[in-house]
Amino acid sequence: MIINPTTAASPPAERWVHQICEAARRVDCGECRALPGDDCVCTTAPASVPVTGNAPVRPVRGYHVARLCRGFRRGLISGPDLVAVLQATVVFTTATVIYDPAGADAWGGAR
Ligand SMILES: [Zn+2]
């Protein structure tokens, strides 16, 4: 039996980005001054692909790259995790927003 170590060892990518966003959420944001526990951005995004005029939308929460960097400096986000999420954006500044793929529903709608 052959086990693919990449598949076996890696959590789903969405869960991984969600965990990084959760860590970033614990610090304040140097870009937009969002306080710990608040979102940098709360907006809506298409819930399905392809996106058509009638595509349903869902609430999503986003966090500035500056906030992820602050989370890294405070030891909440590892260097490799920060680099990986920034590489996925291809081009970014401190004002780039990283969206939590879990959406706003992950917090039970309490906010
Ligand atoms: Zn922010």
Image (spheres, rainbow, N blue to C red):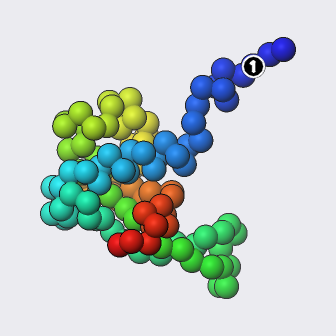
Look at the numbered disc 1 and give the secondary structure of its residue.
Answer: loop
Quadrant housing the N terminus: top right
Residue farthest toward the bottom in the current orientation of the protein: 54
Q: Position of residue 94 (x, y in %)?
A: 25, 52
Q: Residues within 10 Å of mark 1 (few under 14, many from 20)?
A: few
Residue farthest toward the top in the current orientation of the protein: 1
Residue situated in front as seen by the camera: 105 or 83? 105
Q: Position of residue 103 (x, y in %)?
A: 48, 64
Q: Relative to residue 97, is residue 56 depicted above or below?
A: below
Q: Is residue 103 visible?
A: yes
Quadrant housing the C terminus: bottom left
Task: Look at 52% across and 46% down and name the residue there.
Answer: 15
Q: Is residue 60 visible?
A: no
Q: In the picture provided, is 66 more to the left or to the right than 2?
A: left
Q: Relative to residue 27, is residue 60 depicted above or below?
A: below
Q: In the picture provided, is 43 more to the left or to the right than 27?
A: right
Residue situated in front as seen by the camera: 91 or 20? 20
Q: Tell me the quarter of the picture where residue 96 sits.
A: bottom left
Q: Position of residue 49 (x, y in %)?
A: 68, 67
Task: Look at 32% across and 58% down and name the residue there.
Answer: 63
Badge 1 is on which residue? 3
Q: Tell me the quarter of the picture where residue 75 sits.
A: top left
Task: Look at 66% across and 26% down and name the residue there.
Answer: 8
Residue farthest toward the right in the current orientation of the protein: 1
The residue type indicated by label 1 comes to: Ile
